[in-house]
Image: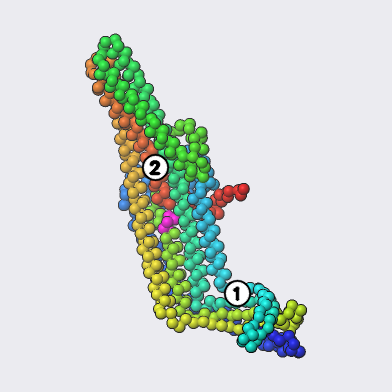
Amino acid sequence: MTSNPRVPGAGGCGVERLRRSARLLVPACVAAAMLSGCFTVGPDYTKVKPQAPKAWHAGLDAGETSRTVDPAKLARWWTVLGDPELTSLEAQAVEGNLDFRQALARVREARAALGIEKAGLYPALDSGGEAIKQRASENAGMAGESRLYDVGFDAGWELDIFGGVRRSIEAASAGLAAMHEDLRDVLVSLEAEVARNYVEVRTYQARLAAARANLQVQQKSYDLNLSRFKSGLIDELAVQQSLQALESTRALIPSLKTGLAGAENRLAVLLGRTPGSLDAKLSPARPIPAPPITVAVGIPAGTLRRRPDVRRAERLLAAQTAEIGVATADLYPKLRLLGSIGLESLSTGNLWQWVSRTYRIGPSFSWPIFHAGAIRRNIEVQTARQEQALIAYEKTVLAAQEDVENALVAYAKSQRRRDALTRAETAAERTVVLAEDQYRAGLIDFTTVLDAQRTLQSLQDGLASSEGAVILNLVRLYKALGGGWTPMTSRKAPRRPKKK
């Protein structure tokens, strides 16, 4: 490659040879570029569609309807609960949640990886240089020291004749789409978790209010029995029974406060804040949100097309199908167009002279002949992985249907339980009033009053839990329907933490 700087008149011949090489190379490049779009080995992906029944197996008899779901309303399903505090918390969660920000970073990673794969379609150009001082061995008959200086550019372009690069771009594009669906899945789960923990906060507050109300009633019963005992009207048994009921209720309150603090702390972490930072904001008790009269659930096919986990599984199947093509392309020749141009001299004084130029232009190819079956085994590996991806997709579809069916049943049954507990509580309240009146009149002993109070307390606590369970199952239903995401262009990107 080294041009002799002492040969006079070498410049004209070198330029002419360079021009002849270029004239030969240009048609070869054009022909190779045309060929690169003709062949794409490996299977072409045909988009799979989820197999879904025409209607949900669970009956829609608790306010659900099969009418078409409005995507805009489903994207902000929590607004149907009519709770401004919850709406505010949902917005703050998208701004600060760490899982969501991590999922956004994974999307950026996948987008950058796609850019790397696309770069394979274009030529690569590198520059470099070196200054070498070397000494030959006297025993080799070439004694002495020499220096070599070299600067130049190298270019290379692997022509994608059989589509290996295009298949890798196809796989990376599907992978990027899968990351987008993963981001949406994180968003769906996040907004459901925020609503769930908020409802738990309000449920614990309702249970605490019921416990405190019962504590006041039981305190009055104890004071009354203690007064009557001191007056000799009753024996000590009624006093101890009323004291036992009073302290049992008092012991319940700390555990409820513990549960309340845990729900508030989980909610704070979901918003990307430190535990305890929401205590002041959530401490004023508010009622448990009421469910809407009707809930549009649509048909199974629409839900499966909307759920991010199903969409992600489909994109992963597409990506793995493309990987078969990437592996198959290794069976075929690879054609590269290579070129380099530079300056080379034994001294820096001559390096920048025209006669110091060097160049090298021409095509090269490689073709694997014998690799002990490794390439075909890799094709089998990728094919088996595609089969696994298809099975994973089918499992995701079935799990999604199960998720919705279970949520429909749970939502309907929790409403029936709540209605029954409401009627039972009304009867229990009347029972307590009647029992207390008869006890004061001396018609019954305190055991009957105590049983009535215990039953009422249990029903009130159960009713508060049941009202919360109705909303929790509604949240579960909306999550199962894939509610809570919209195209990211319609959302504000979360703020990144400032660098210190």
Residue 443: name its quadrant: top left
Task: Please give the label number shown on residue 123.
Answer: 1
Residue at x-position 39% and y-position 44% = 474
Residue at x-position 74% and y-position 87% = 6
49 w.r.t. 30: above or below = above
CA separation, marks 2 and 1? 57 Å
Quadrant of the image containing the N terminus: bottom right
How many marks on residues? 2
Q: Please indicate, yes or no, whether residue 82 appears anywhere in the rendered image.
A: no
Q: Please indicate, yes or no, whether residue 316 appears anywhere in the rendered image.
A: yes
Q: Work out whether residue 341 or residue 162 is closer to the camera in this orientation and state it.
A: 341
Image coloring type: rainbow
Residue 385: name its quadrant: bottom left
Residue at x-position 31% and y-position 21% = 243
Task: Please give the label number shown on residue 472.
Answer: 2
Q: Amino acid at mark 2?
A: Leu
Question: Is label 2 or label 1 in front?
Answer: 1
390 w.r.t. 340: above or below = above
- What are the residue bounds of the magenta stretch? 307-311
247 w.r.t. 366: above or below = above
Residue 455: image location, x then y, percent: 29, 28
Residue 115: image location, x then y, percent: 56, 65
